[in-house]
Amino acid sequence: MALVLFLTFVPATFAQGAGKSSQYGLIFDEMMRFIKTYYIDEVDDKALFEGAMKGMFDAIGDPHSVFMTEQEMDSASDSAMGQFGGVGLYISKYSADVGYDEDRLPYVRVVSPIEDTPAYRLGIKAGDYIVKVDGKSTETMTLDEVAKIMRGKPGTTVSITFLRDKNIVFTYDIERANIEVPSVKSDLIEKNIGYLRITNFAANTPDKVKEALDNFSKKRIKYLVIDLRSNPGGVLESAIEIADFFLDDGVIVSVKSKIPSWNQVYNASKKVKISKSVPIAVLIDRGSASAAEILSAALSDNGRAVLIGETTYGKGSVQQLRSLGKDGFKLTMGKYYTPKDINIDKVGIPPEKEVKDRDLTDEEKASYKKLIEEYRIQKFVKDNPKPSDLQIDTFIQQLKSEGIVMEDRILRKLVRNEVNFNNNDSPVYDLEFDVVLQEAVRMLKSGEIKAK
């Protein structure tokens, strides 16, 4: 999700510097008149306008800067409010002009699934590519064109073909639903470890976080885990306000723009909601983007927390959403910098302690590909919605007898995840299989992470 500042359209903004580009403006106006006068058929003014605007933004070469129709503006507003209709995926796309990574494919990429949504329950992961929507290749489609197809009336379906690990292809007919984005989940681990999961940064997220922190304070927790994995970001001000709950001094983030007067430094203001004696571990991965990276860097750079997991997504630009009547646009108008004055765009934030599931061997990858493409786990859970340990063990042995090469632990995790997805009963945290959370708990309890 883009890092968005919602501002009101001010016509004067476009008056600045008009003289510098007046030549092109005159040519543009003349071209519009010429087409309307001489083209053989009638031309719709709105269609010409929208086509010209889309072309203008495409020419920038920035996937985060786009012209938006009335429908797309409504969808953006719904997302900001934390509710919309669709399958539950945050997506992104890098144009060839950006040169982000030679390994990136020219398709729409999943930044992260939204918890407890149709796509999440199907096991779609950050990093998966969407190669087709309703049978159409996404290679030449814009991000908004793909999003427009995926969204729709709840109860209707959309066919999406995914590519995972460059050679695993699978298609789901996903039923759209009302997507209500749950931004905060919390619970206790072992009675004295607070677990706070922030799934996105909506306007009301700080209030939800404050409520959770107040509850943790009453329970007198000794340690805190903040989970920002697969958090695609959201509203800048929300991330800043939440960072302020943990910091009583120092820079949270700075935003730099082409317009010097728009540059701004955000500092902590002594609104701490959790005791400074509580050590904090922050969990991150490649699905942590934008506002999630702002919070991660603010806590890490100021020495308030230790980052554990994988390098983050690398979304260091700031977009503003503005209206043009009922239409509008989203334009990159700044970049944010961490307290150490680093812009992490296209780079990401590395963890201080890298922890992730081990990479599968080539033989295991082949087995995993077979399981995914043949929907073996899904079919088993469909026939056994609440399987017993014995049923799971029997199923695992059956898979192995068929030549599936994979650890029992990994297979058991895949089955358990599918059961949770299928029954819409995902736990707040997973200490049994989550190796990153396991390491965070170990480091906190051992004193390797100290309060600062």
Image (cartoon, grey):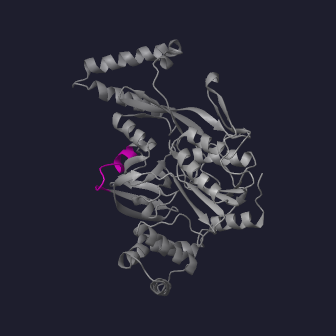
Residue 184, magenta (yes or no) = no
Q: x%, y% of residue 164?
A: 49, 62
Decide which of 255, 429 is in the foreground and name it. Answer: 429
Give the answer, above or below, for where 437 lies relative to 145. Answer: below
Give the answer, above or below, for where 13 lies relative to 122. Answer: above
Q: x%, y% of residue 128?
A: 49, 58
Q: x%, y% of residue 400?
A: 50, 84
Residue at left offset 73%, top offset 46% = 301
The single residue placed furthest to the top in the displayed view is 19
Residue 101 as seen in the image, left or right of residue 397: right
Q: Which residues are magenta?
A: 145-157
Decide which of 190, 431 is in the foreground and name it. Answer: 190
Residue 324 as seen in the image, left or right of residue 191: left
Give the answer, above or below, for where 41 lies relative to 372. Answer: above
The single residue placed furthest to the front in the displayed view is 218
**What is the quadrant of residue 9 in the picture?**
top left
**What is the quadrant of residue 381 in the picture?**
bottom left
